[in-house]
Amino acid sequence: MTNNNPGCLGYLFQLFGINLGGKTTTNTLDAFPYGIRDDFLSPSELSFYKILTQVIPNQYAICPKVSLKDIFFVTEKDRSKHQTYFNKISKKHVDFLICSAQSMKPVCGIELDDTSHARDDRIKRDEFVNRLYEEAGLKLIRFSNKKAYTISEVQEKVQSIVNYEQFVSTIRGTTSLGKLEDTNEVPKCPKCKSPFVLRTAKSGKNKGKQFYGCVNYPKCRETIDID
Ligand SMILES: [Zn+2]
């Protein structure tokens, strides 16, 4: 902050044409002090993006730098609490969001963790973000941030999520992705990387219905419903 900073109240006054004295300022609404940044993506983000374009099938869109408030919404009904929860996501963004190209429905988020992620405040932030994705039911993949990435390391992590999503769409019959290859194969559990197995619900409201569950049940409760 500079000494010329008029502060919040000063800006408000300026908005209404009132100058609090001192240095004369030009009308801030007439000026357009903007330029195009030449670092929309950092070198490592760009390197990662280029690999994503090779790894992600055409049925998916890659969106860089998406605000979390555009991906998630606050389910809290209480107005005062709502704002607090909204503030927690309103200024955060995810490095990449993978969406279904047809519907632009989010499929998974991808975060590149740089060295700042070891800092206390970042660890808290990451814990919050991890929980946000988990509770809302969206997959999140993390990569440690490097100057350069290899295709195989990115492919391995991303492919399991993409296979999973395609498989879910296929068994639910909701896919409009056209011809799907290699999706008859049951994907691995995105949580613990173990295979899914076809099971039948023995009790509860879904009794008798089939679903895919992680082979590690009850240790891992990841399931795919067949609707
Ligand atoms: Zn599992």
Image: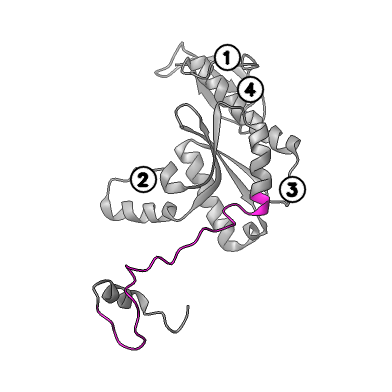
Dot 2: element: loop
Counting residues from the N terminus, which is met first, the one under dot 4 or under dot 2? Answer: 2
Crowding at dot 4, Cα within 10 Å, few <14 / some 14-19 / many 20+, comes out as many
Tell me how far mark 3 sits from mark 2, CA to CA: 36 Å
* Foreground of the two, 111 or 130: 111
Is residue 189 depicted above or below 96 in this figure? above
Label 4 – label 2 distance at C-alpha:
31 Å
Structural distance between the alpha carbons of marks 1 and 2: 36 Å
- Start-end of magenta stretch: 18-45
Q: Is residue 217 visible?
A: no
Q: Residue at coordinates 60% horizontally, 28% vertically from top-left?
A: 162
The residue that label 1 is drawn on is 179
In screen coordinates, is 13 left or right of 136? left
- Vertical position of residue 129 compared to residue 116: above or below: above
- Indicate which label's residue lies in the foreground, 3 or 2: 3
Secondary structure state at the residue bearing disc 4:
loop
- Disc 4 target residue: 187
Expressed as whole percent of the image width and height from the top left, the position of residue 168 reads 53, 21
Q: What is the quadrant of residue 227 in the picture?
A: top left
Amino acid type, label 4: Pro
Q: Identify the residue at horizontal 63%, vertical 18% (top origin).
A: 186
Find out whether the residues at labels 3 and 2 contact each other: C-beta distance under 8 Å. no
Ranked by sequence position, the earlier of labels 3 and 1 is 3
Q: Is residue 79 left or right of residue 187?
A: left
CA distance separating discs 3 and 1:
33 Å
Relative height, residue 178 to residue 71 (above, below): above
Confirm or deny contact between disc 4 and disc 2 (CB under 8 A). no
Q: Amino acid at mark 2?
A: Val
The residue at which mark 2 appears reads as 74
Q: Are marks 1 and 4 in contact (CB under 8 Å)?
A: no
Q: Which three-letter amino acid code belongs to the residue tagged 1? A: Lys
Q: Which residue carries the number 3 mark?
A: 148
